[in-house]
Amino acid sequence: MQGFARSLMDNAGIIHLINTLPSDIWELTPEGQKIRLPRRMSGQAPVIWRGQSPRALKSMITPPVVPFLVLFLGREHNIETYRDWIDAHSFPLTVVAEKGGTITYEEFSLEKLKEAFLNICDALKGQVKPDALEIARTHLGNWREPEERDLGYKVGGHNAIAPNLSALYAAGYHNTIDGRFTQIDEGIAPYVELIVQTTRSVLMERERIGERAANKYFRRPPSVNLFAPAVYPHFHEANLTNAPLLTEEKRRFLAVRRVFQRQDGYGLEASTQAQAKAILGAEDGEETRLHPLISERAAELRLATECVSTLSASEVSAVIRLPNSVNRTSGQVRQFAQHYHAKRTTDKKRLDAFKKAQSAITASVPTEFFEFVEEAEDGIRLIADAHLEWMNVRGLPLCVQKDISRIPVTPGNLFIEQVLPKENLHLTTSDFEEILILSALRNDDPISMYFDKAFAIFEPHFADKVCVRTERIRNEEDLVAALNSYNGSLVIFDGHGGHAKGKPAELQLLEESIDIWQLQRKRLRVPPIVILSACDTHAADRNHASTANGFLAIGARTVLGSVFPIDARDAASFIARLLYRVAEFVPASHKVFNQSLTWMEIMGGMIRMQLLTDFCRRLKSKGLIDQETYRAVHLAGNLAINGGDQWPYETVVAELSDRGIDEKRAWHELRSAIANSTAISYLQMGCPETIIVHPDDGFRDEARAETDTNQ
């Protein structure tokens, strides 16, 4: 239903165990425990695990320089299958297994893990430097069980709050669950109350830790995650006409599927006796047997929850689990998308359609959660397929009020790869000295001129700092060759995109159209940052097989995708301004604020700047402001956006009001500009918050020195 590997679903309990472990051998020393939470909150100590098939696992030998790897075998796995591979190592690999391993599940503990690691140190004598072994032994010998803290309350255990409890466990709050959550028949209110309570506890812990000097360099990842598990859209549309099922089995399947389709809250509710029978599979007095779909979905949700819990524990970040009602807003989103695709539409029709979609999305999110959204200072990560970027926050979409990143929840295996914590990728401004543009527009294409026109305006401002390399891409072979010959950090695709219903998305090259997902079979060097200046690269009303998701699947760390068709002139201007932003704004920001920037922050500001320009142009085109006022308002907005104003558009509207523009009219025109701006079409996919851009000068060394002394 969501696209997970069955073996991972069967072993979600292992992930739960992993989430309780230290991230490295130093973390449990007295010194490590003092700064354990600041390190995690700075993205420096993620809990990293990878699911591996037997074939993939046995294809590589762990080198002695990274010896403290632990292999967890599922209870159904026979260790003898891996014996030759285990014995091929030059040190005793730590294997946790039902039987025959280094440690059994029954006896597993930190003390046993410490014992296994010390044995590894003994075996590594002569293979690694003696001082490194001595440091490792010292760290392991100083391990101490973390001091347990009292949260002041206990909760009933449930998936909805499991990630928050994992974050609190990392903070020392171990004994937090008192039995199972029992209020499953009382609507969403009890769930929301628990989510609010545990979210507040996590955020209070982050507030207690506060900003540290090291955060100038190690930028803090988002403090709030909005998590909405989902299923493949086609699950609800699958035709059972030719399915190998008996008539009664089909009837029961369809009844259970209708329960899923109508789910609004956190649990399934049968509205009729027939649905209840279909779910339980029993008449009165008979033994109940849950329908396989129910069991399957429960297993998927447990796995998804444990994966998000790893992220929460690694960052000490809050996870707000959203009710399924957010996924039921897809109909309104689809209608809005149709206005964007329609040949004949108007600004008013588009605004009305956007208002309906935005209202539906906003209403689907419990009001109790909005305080956390508004107060999130480190940005917000969306772990969802629903278009939460458009939810109304203080009158405007979330995507222009906060720095936002998005991890899709389908397909499941891609979701796992994206949601697992990652080590930060540290870049400097010099890593953007060469930018690769993949040009797939014919010379006679009417829109091919717009990049040249936009660059003619902006290139003089960045030409001495950024070299733009353009490659004409005829076919898949050209695309692979261009990517493999480029060692830079940012690639831009300039061309046409499309996504037909029920099919994978495609990029149109000069001679052929390609499905990016098919490049998984190729050996590719994909830059960490991919910008898709093309239409429908993550279309709002299509399936999970989008071009943006495809680039994530082949190795990009973050992808800028588009929900709708985008205006070629606006897209070209956006790209030219982005390069100007990288060349000029980023270094200036480093100096003014004396801190590094995440790519999420850089792109979030760029999207807000795009809306500011669209808004000012709209006001001028309607005769509401003249050129002088345009410049003044744009400057005020620029300073508010790039100066870190919490609500920059309120500053912009106030500036307009001071210049005689009616405030209500200004807000109306701003919302109309939003509905017609590419700002709401762009999505930051993947993990842009894990890409940190530093200055080229000595600030990095200074920040590292502060890390050592002031954490």
Image: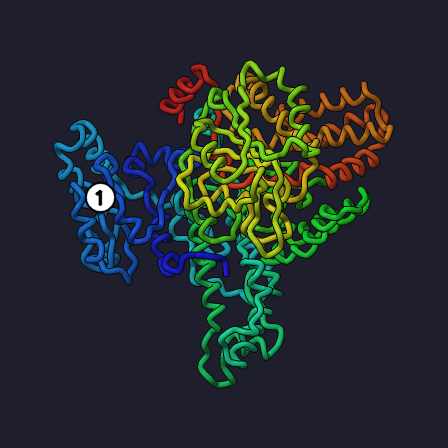
Residue placed most toward the observer, 527 or 396: 527
Image coordinates of residue 372 in percent, x first then y, are 59, 43
Q: Is residue 277 above or below residue 315?
A: below
Residue placed most toward the observer, 234 or 166: 234
Badge 1 crowding class, 10 Å Cα cut-off, few under 14, some 14 to 19, many 20 or more, is some
Image coordinates of residue 188 in percent, x first then y, are 59, 60
Left or right of 164: which side holds 456?
A: right
Residue drawn at x 62%, y 65% as measured from the top left = 262
Identify the residue position indicated by label 1 in the image.
114
Q: Is residue 463 above or below residue 577?
A: above
What's the amino acid at mark 1? Lys
Q: Is residue 131 above or below residue 361?
A: above
Residue drawn at x 54%, y 50% as measured from the top left = 545
Q: How many marks?
A: 1
In this figure, which colouring scheme has been used for the structure?
A: rainbow
Is any part of residue 647 visible from this angle?
Answer: no
Left or right of 26: which side holds 9?
A: right
Which image quarter holds the C terminus?
top left
Residue placed most toward the observer, 350 or 539: 539
| Quarter residue 656 falls in | top right
| Quarter residue 81 falls in | bottom left
Left or right of 240: which side holds 4?
A: left
Residue placed most toward the observer, 503 or 571: 503
Q: Which secondary structure, mark 1? A: helix
Is any part of residue 123 visible from this angle?
Answer: yes
Residue drawn at x 47%, y 73% as measured from the top left = 290
Image coordinates of residue 662 in percent, x first then y, are 85, 32
Image coordinates of residue 276 in percent, x first then y, are 56, 76
Residue drawn at x 39%, y 24% as measured from the top left = 707
| Quarter residue 644 falls in | top right
